[in-house]
Image (cartoon, rainbow, N blue to C red):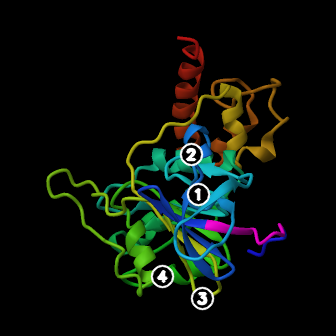
Amino acid sequence: MKSNLGNNRSVGRIIKGIGGFYTVESQGALYTLKAAGKFRNDVKTPLPGDFVEFDPQEGDDGAFDAIRPRRNQLIRPRVANVDLVFALVSARDPAPDYLLLDKLCISAAMMDIQVVAVLNKCDLTDEAAKATFLDTYRAFTPLCASHLTGEGMGRLRALARGRVSCFAGQSGVGKSSITRAFLPEREEIKVSGLSQKTRRGRHTTRHAELLPMEEGGGYLVDTPGFSLMELPLMEPERLKDYYPEFLPYEGKCRFAGCLHHREPDCAVKAAVEVGSIPRARWERYGALLAEAQEKWRKRYE
């Protein structure tokens, strides 16, 4: 990214940060910089993906002193200015956590980030299960993928080209395996199987990092896996706004402000009954709505 700041000031993107040092890419060059002292007392912590301003100098002892406004920011993983989230579940080992997948889709939608729902390790399941997944998540450009058979990998590459793309999902779903398939030259990307004791994924990535893609440009974010995720506090009636399947039915219910859950003459429930909206998504929406209502009731406690 070129700078128009003048006075030899530069703008670059943070690629990674470890131990107080940040690798910043600017106009094809890499700089190892520290954050200026003022950030120690600032609630805005530098993140991979941030665009920062600095004075380039000889050696690796420089510092950046400004962070440009973010378009968005993910909390888990901690990365900024993401264009696309690949929200992964695995077909098996570990068992797919669809409630977590729904939370990932909601979180990305809240920040206006495009979501692609991915059923990874699809070589471990049958065609019927894959068809069910594709139908259930049809609002999120869904695809099935396997780095072993190559299924879906071409589509993943095409979607990631020229963007900052983030793989997100519980531990063990294969985020690092897909990244390794995309970037075979990055031998430092560690891939680990499941814990034999818990049958859950083991963390193989310790920090978020932007990995540059040579083919078509763009970056991949290899991130720590996680198994639990909480949605932020919100007014319960806002939750439905993050379900694209519901949007065509807004204003068609009997009651204004319908939550699309228990109300009579609800257009969304009618769509569920005829199969226009996936029932599984609507049922999990009910569980998340109850969670949001409980949090809202206790917001002052």
Looking at numbered disc 2 in the image, what kind of residue is underneath it?
Answer: Arg
Q: Mark 2 points at which residue?
A: 281
Residue 215: mark: 3
Please state the horizontal and vertical placement of residue 271, each as a whole percent of the image: 70, 44
Asked whether 260 or 21 is in front, the reply is: 21
Q: In this view, does 45 lie above or below 232?
A: below
Residue 184 in the image: state x and y as whole percent. 41, 86
Q: In this view, does 199 lie to the left or right of 3?
A: left
- Mark sitting earlier along the chain (1/3): 1
- Please state the extent of the stretch shown in magenta in the rendering: 5-13
Q: Are marks 1 and 3 in contact (CB under 8 Å)?
A: no
Q: Position of residue 158 (x, y in %)?
A: 63, 81
Q: Amino acid under label 4?
A: Phe
Type of amino acid at the residue the image marks with label 3: Glu
Disc 2 element = helix
Please say whether residue 253 is one of the residues in the magenta stretch.
no
State the image quarter where residue 51 is shown. bottom right
Above-or-below relation of 233 to 194: above
Amino acid tagged 1: Tyr
Helix, strand or loop status at disc 3: loop
**Residue count near mark 2 (Cα–Cα under 10 Å), binned few <14, some 14–19, many ≥20:** some
Q: How far apart are marks 1 and 3 (CA)?
A: 28 Å
Of residue 134 and residue 181, the one placed in the foreground of this image is 181
Task: Tell me if label 4 and label 1 are in contact, CB under 8 Å.
Answer: no
The residues bearing labels 2 and 3 have C-alpha atoms spaced at a distance of 36 Å
State the separation of the CA atoms marked 2 and 1: 8 Å
Using the numbered discs, state the Cα–Cα distance from disc 3 to disc 4 in whole angstroms: 10 Å
Q: Which residue is drawn at 66% across and 72% down?
A: 56
Marks 2 and 1 in Cβ contact (< 8 Å): yes
Mark closer to the chain start, 2 or 4: 4
